[in-house]
């Protein structure tokens, strides 16, 4: 019993999960049952995959001990590249592939510069934030290109499931979340990510290729962000060069609310997702309970600090519970 | 030197201007426990880091069981049976004991290009055995290493080295920051290495500890070996004098 209690206190995503349940109950009552009705849920589930995928990438990268501030810009750049290619007559699958390659290259540059020049990734990716945003506007030629009419929306944005509850994007999100979560918790590669971020000298001296592990996390983070940007553009129907602005900090907030440590080594994919859901719920719940929308950022800020404090407190409590022997 | 398990010949190492090793030659005999002493900055850790693949020598030769070898990365050293317990802690505090024991050498159910699904059952059962084998009493292999005492953490690192059947175990100041009781446990462990057929290199600033558990003492100063004698043939005072 005591052990079970301790094990749960040690779970990094616990604070976020408790907050999530609390907020759902509060908003459901405050909005007189509108919050959890089908239409509102459908709206939230339609947007969730976009910010959720970015949060997954940022969380995993953070566990490996690094940061990515360029995700918001990559979020805009990848669909812009695709749109421009498709206007030139390139078919969708090829444009998708090219877009993902662009993301992979950006992630690789972020990682390579960070690791080989021993620069904090905060700086490298801050630079990339500006570079990728600028490229997005340059590539667009000043005004957003028109998307062709024959897009495979059935694969990404169409509504499916009982009562048309989900968009296809949600299935992509769920699948990717499941795969990355398993990768982190059940594979040796996941073990290397945690070791690299947890204590780099020990990981390196035990023969883990820490540079390659981090590089892979940078590339994964960029590709997930670009893919998420494409989902948003397909949903909106137009590749605006300004999408994803401020997303990088929201993604960091998601990861941190979900229990990931800025110092690396601690965190889970589930935590990053819980953090994202919390932010979406606050966004939506404040509107439904007729609160001035300008309180949104206040709430996110408060939540971020509160979640981290709660997490630290719980970890301390868990440590204080001494087991027999 | 047919009974030398590791020989180094004329090792040199420069760190951007600092000549940290100036032609070190040393034979490590099979089954002996070697004490390596020397002042701060003498080059002890540098020598050890070269043997364990963390750094590479700029000049010189390493022979393992008489054969010249190239140790370019930690994995090479591990494959040669050289396990190192580092001066700083060589465990990851945010991970469980079981996960720490298998870092970089995780058993997998199947794998593609070296990446695969962890065999968690095997990790759990083997880590219980590995911990028991070094006489470490820990409640569960799922506990986080960050919650253990300094001595217990070193115990985990030692259990890991033993589990992977090392031929040579290098301990770089393993008793730093340990209480008297935990220090004597580590010393006892170094003494026990011989019975297990493992050759040991023990680095310490405490001469009494070295004379307590080693067969031979090597003293280094300013990147050179200045004394290399069997314990019976020397004394703490003599070693102090050459440093
Ligand atoms: N990574 C490094 N980069 C640059 N110089 C280094 C590095 N590691 C060691 N040195 C230098 O090499 C010399 C030898 O250092 P080393 O760590 O081998 O000494 P040591 O005998 O282990 O000392 P201590 O007892 O303090 O651990 C020192 O002058 C040190 O400053
Ligand atoms: Mg040293």
Image (tube, coloured by chain):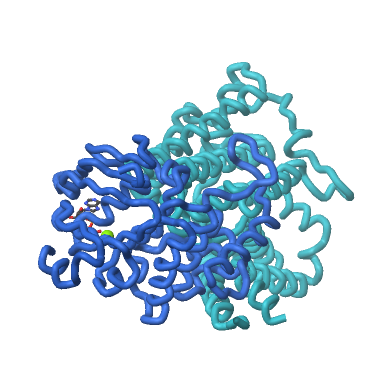
Chain colours: A cyan, B blue
Decide if residue A56 is on the left or right side of residue A67: right
Decide if residue B59 is on the left or right side of residue A268: left
Front residue (pair A130, B101): B101
x 82%, y 61%: residue: A37
- Where's the N terminus of chain B, which quadrant? top left
Q: How many marks?
A: 0
- Where's the C terminus of chain B, which quadrant? bottom left
Residue A280 placement (x, y as % from top left): 65, 59
Ligand 2 quadrant? bottom left
Residue A84 placement (x, y as % from top left): 56, 24
The image shows residue A144, relative to residue A169, as above or below, that is above
Front residue (pair B59, A234): B59
x 50%, y 55%: residue: A195
Q: Is residue A211 visible?
A: yes
The image shows residue B111, relative to residue B170, as above or below, that is above
Front residue (pair A152, A60): A60
x 55%, y 68%: residue: B144
The image shows residue A307, relative to residue A229, as above or below, that is below
Q: Is residue A251 visible?
A: no
- What residue occupies the far left of the structure in this picture? B241
Decide if residue B111 is on the left or right side of residue A250: right
- What residue occupies the far top of the structure in this picture? A89
Front residue (pair B191, A131): B191
Residue A258 placement (x, y as % from top left): 59, 63
Residue B41 placement (x, y as % from top left): 19, 59
Decide if residue A245 is on the left or right side of residue A154: left
């Amino acid at each position: 019993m005591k052990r079970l209690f301790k094990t749960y206190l040690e779970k990094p995503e616990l604070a976020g999960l408790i907050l999530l349940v609390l907020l759902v109950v509060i908003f459901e009552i405050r909005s007189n049952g509108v919050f959890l009705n089908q239409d509102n849920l459908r709206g939230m589930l339609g947007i969730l995959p976009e910010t959720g995928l970015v949060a997954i990438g940022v969380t995993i990268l953070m566990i490996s001990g690094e940061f990515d501030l360029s995700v918001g810009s990559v979020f805009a750049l990848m669909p812009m590249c695709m749109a421009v290619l498709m206007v030139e007559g390139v078919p969708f699958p090829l444009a998708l592939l090219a877009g993902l390659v662009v993301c992979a290259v950006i992630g690789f540059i972020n990682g390579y510069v960070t690791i080989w020049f021993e620069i904090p990734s905060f700086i490298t990716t801050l630079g990339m934030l500006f570079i990728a945003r600028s490229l997005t506007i340059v590539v667009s030629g000043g005004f957003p290109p028109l998307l062709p009419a024959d897009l495979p929306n059935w694969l990404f944005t169409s509504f499916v499931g009982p009562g048309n509850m989900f968009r296809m994007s949600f299935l992509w999100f769920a699948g990717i979340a499941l795969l990355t979560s398993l990768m982190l918790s059940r594979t040796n590669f996941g073990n290397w990510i945690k070791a690299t971020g947890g204590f780099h000298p020990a990981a390196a001296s035990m023969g883990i290729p820490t540079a390659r592990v981090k590089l892979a996390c940078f590339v994964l983070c960029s590709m997930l962000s670009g893919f998420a940007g494409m989902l948003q553009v397909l949903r909106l129907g137009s590749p605006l060069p300004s999408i994803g602005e401020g997303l990088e900090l929201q993604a960091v907030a998601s990861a941190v609310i979900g229990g990931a440590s800025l110092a690396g080594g601690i965190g889970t994919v589930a935590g990053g997702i819980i953090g994202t859901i919390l932010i979406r719920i606050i966004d939506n719940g404040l509107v439904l309970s007729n609160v001035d929308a300008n309180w949104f950022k206040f709430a996110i800020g408060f939540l971020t600090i509160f979640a981290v404090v709660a997490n630290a407190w719980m970890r301390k409590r868990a440590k204080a519970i001494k087991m027999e022997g | 030197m047919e009974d030398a398990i590791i020989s180094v010949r004329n090792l040199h190492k420069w760190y951007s201007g600092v000549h940290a090793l100036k032609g070190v030659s040393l034979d490590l005999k099979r089954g002996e426990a070697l004490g390596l002493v020397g002042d701060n900055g003498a080059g002890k850790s540098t020598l050890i880091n070269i043997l364990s693949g963390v750094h590479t020598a700029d000049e010189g030769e390493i022979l393992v069981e008489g054969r010249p070898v190239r140790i370019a990365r930690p994995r090479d050293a591990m494959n040669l049976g050289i396990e190192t317990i580092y001066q700083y802690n060589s465990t990851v505090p945010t991970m469980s004991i079981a996960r720490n024991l298998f870092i970089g050498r995780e058993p997998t159910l199947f794998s593609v290009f070296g990446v695969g699904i962890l065999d968690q059952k095997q990790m759990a059962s083997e880590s219980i055995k590995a911990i028991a084998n070094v006489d470490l009493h820990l409640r569960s292999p799922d506990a986080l290493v960050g919650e253990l005492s300094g001595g217990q953490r070193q115990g985990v690192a030692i259990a890991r080295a033993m589990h992977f059947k090392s031929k040579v175990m290098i301990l770089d100041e393993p008793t730093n920051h340990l209480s008297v009781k935990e220090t004597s446990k580590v010393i006892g462990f170094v003494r026990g290495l011989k019975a297990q057929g493992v050759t040991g290199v023990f680095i310490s600033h405490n001469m009494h500890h070295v004379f307590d558990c080693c067969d031979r003492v090597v003293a280094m100063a300013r990147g050179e070996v200045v004394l290399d004698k069997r314990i019976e043939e020397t004394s703490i005072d003599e070693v102090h004098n050459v440093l």
